Amino acid sequence: MSTYVYGITERSHAALPEGLAGVGEPPLPVRVLTEGDLAAIVSDAPENLRPKRKDLLAHQNVLAEAGAEGCVLPMRFGSVAPDDKAVTGVLAERADHYAERLRALDGKVEYNVKATHVEEAVLHHVMAQSPELRALAESNRQAGGGTYEQRLQLGEMVAAAVQAREAQDAAEVRQTLEPLAASVSVGPESTGWLANVSFLVERDSAAAFAEAVDGLRREHPHLDVRLNGPLPPYSFVEPGPAQPAGAMAE
């Protein structure tokens, strides 16, 4: 039977709670495989696994329970190996990498920060910052709205100003928060977000990091800044255990 992998930790990691169950219907018992100084937190892999809310939460719960007792390298949901032997083989093959990552991530959590513009607020902001835009808008207003070409020119100038502001605000989000983090991982670009960045933060610094995010919101009311965390450090298991040596696949 295939083996579902939740995460990798040290062999000396504290025992998991008795009766801990993971993905599947009914939820499958979680167990530990060991190899050398490492351990993998696993269960049997259910057939036809899909990212349903129940199983996503079960995956997260196993990582939360394990992470409460020490550092765990988290696997992405749906990480499956052919069998237990394949998992222990990967632990042996990549022992140095996993040991280094466990040391580097010990005592740290991930926070993801996404930011976007509040449309009306950023329009007011760029107009307030640009005498040229204000003058052109006032000229059009006095001309009864202006010609089509004048309106088009104003629209293009406003769009360019907003785009420039996006780049400036994205840089400021990162520059403000990066000093509070041990490491930074820039997420994939996605429509609607001007910034999508994950930060690796010491658990003891979590409150200061959250306060810095609140400060960004207060100082930049034209920004919608969203904080998600604390999370297992998914973005910092590099080059990630999701597909080590081809043995485990999402």
Image: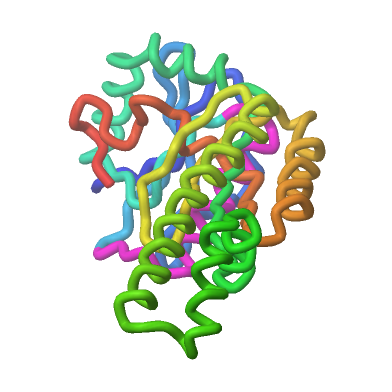
In the image, residue 206 sits, relative to residue 225, either above or below, namely above
Looking at the image, which residue sits at the far top?
Answer: 96
Q: Is residue 228 left or right of residue 50?
A: right
Q: Percent from the top left, x then y, of residue 45?
A: 32, 52
Rendered residue at 40%/56% (across/down): 160
Q: Is residue 62 left or right of residue 149?
A: right
Q: Percent from the top left, x then y, of residue 119?
A: 55, 70
Q: Main secondary structure of the magenta part?
A: helix
Q: Percent from the top left, x then y, of residue 226?
A: 62, 56
Rendered residue at 35%/21% (across/down): 91
- Quadrant in the rendering for residue 205: top right
Q: Percent from the top left, x then y, of residue 107?
A: 68, 25
Highlighted magenta segment, given as a residue range: 48-71
The answer to whether one can see residue 16 in this image is yes
User: Is-magenta flag for residue 68?
Assistant: yes
Looking at the image, which residue sits at the far bottom?
Answer: 144
Rendered residue at 45%/67% (across/down): 26
